[in-house]
Image (cartoon, grey):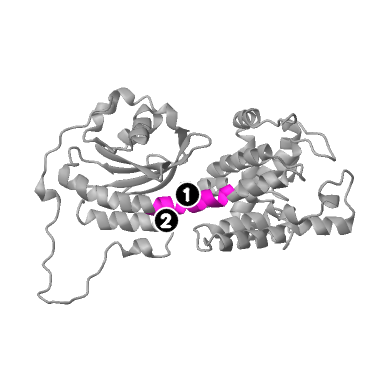
Amino acid sequence: MWWYPTVTVVSSLVQPPALLPDLPVFSHEDGLDLLHQSLPLQEKLERIHDHLRQSLPFIDRIAVASYEPLTDNLKTFLHSSDGEAPLSFYESKLSASSSLTEIATSRRPRVINDMDVLSQDLVREHSRRVRSSGYGASYTMPVAHNGALYGFLFFNSRQKWVFDAQALHHLNMVGHQLSLVVVNELACLRTLMASVRTVTQIAQIRDFETGAHLERMAHYSRIIAQEVAPRFKLDDAFVEYLYLFAPLHDIGKVAVPDSLLLKPGRLEPEEFVQIQQHTVKGRQIVDSMLENFGIQGMQRSEMLRNIVLHHHESLDGSGYPHGLRGDDIPVEARIVAVADVFDALTSERPYKEAWSNDQAFSMLAEMAGRKFDHDCVDALLRNRSEIDRIQGQFAEDFLG
């Protein structure tokens, strides 16, 4: 049972409204008009934070965690804070947190005006990090729409006992508006991914790449992205979008004839040229999907296009379709390339048996710096135990 502290209204926490012009008609600047603008979600969050601080200057951090219902995973997604984020690239099961599960079930926000009451919960990593970063009070809202949970919204302050009735009234209004912005973004992604799963299930009827392959390579992509994040200055949102988009990498194969896609022997040179066109066809399919769903302006859509079009490029320029070299290859494509090839090597195909992990690691290491990004390959090599876990969780089921 969570303690909901009694709060006292402190009027000095909210600034008095500015005097309005003594005119029957006058223009007014809407501080939240940015919500309707075509801006990245991260920028909207930061500007909402700036707007909120005008009335509630003690709000030091706003954070968004996204929820994935299929896996019950809760993951850090976005944040706006006055210092280094206490949580980055962090995920845990929602069911592992009784407090957040209660918020999700009841759809009621939670107020903690003194985070020292969490002292017994400090064994949990997320609680320990937030508290050790100096935050003294927290307000948590569920982000939900039409009965579906999309995540949580956190307002943190380094001061204690700041969330009084007046402050909460203001936070509720801003919080619900921000929640709608987040839901709109994540709903676009869920709609897109639902279409991906449908296309994937159709493609599996005629393709050897199973849903398990897509799950594994998406998780490998996430591992690599987290590891190389310092080098490429990647944030939580980048990693999350990459994880969601990775399964779309070979969507263009639906346009490849069965005679080529399922050919058990070696491809002839002219046949391989046809196979290579799946990257270009895939880009065209993605553009059509975004247009058909009316989400052409979806944030990070260019990342999706890059993954589909460039995941077969090589650092030495020998890849396709454009023969890009080195840093000209988008980092998201470099990450997915390593994840995809590793799983292809360790999976059974009509034309080969599955390699062992050690064999696949050896080949990737040999080609690192020439075909594949060296840091991306090293990221997999450093996470062998996690790879074993993913392979166990998403093993092939050939009996259906």
Res. 131 image quadrant: top left
Q: Does the magenta stretch include residue 152?
A: no
**Label 1 amino acid?**
Ala
Q: Nearer the viewer, residue 158 or 2?
A: 2
Q: Residue at x 28, y 57 (%)?
A: 50
Name the secondary structure under disc 2: helix
Query: Pointer 2: what residue?
Result: 41
Quick one: label 1, few (<14), some, or many (20+) residues within 10 Å? many
**Disc 1 to disc 2: CB gap under 8 Å:** yes
Residue located beneath label 1 in the image: 237
User: Quadrant location of residue 346?
Assistant: top right
Question: Image point 71% across, 53% down: which residue?
Answer: 312
Q: Name the residue at 64% across, 32% down.
A: 394
Secondary structure of the residue carrying tag 1 is helix
**Viewer-proximal residue, 173 or 365?**
173
> Residue furthest toward the top?
120
Part of the protein shown in magenta: 181-194
| Residue 333 position in % (x across, y down) | 63, 53
Would you say the magenta stretch is mainly helix, strand or loop? helix
In-front residue for pair 2/16: 2
* Alpha-carbon span between mark 1 and mark 2: 9 Å
Tell me the amino acid under the disc marked 2: Leu
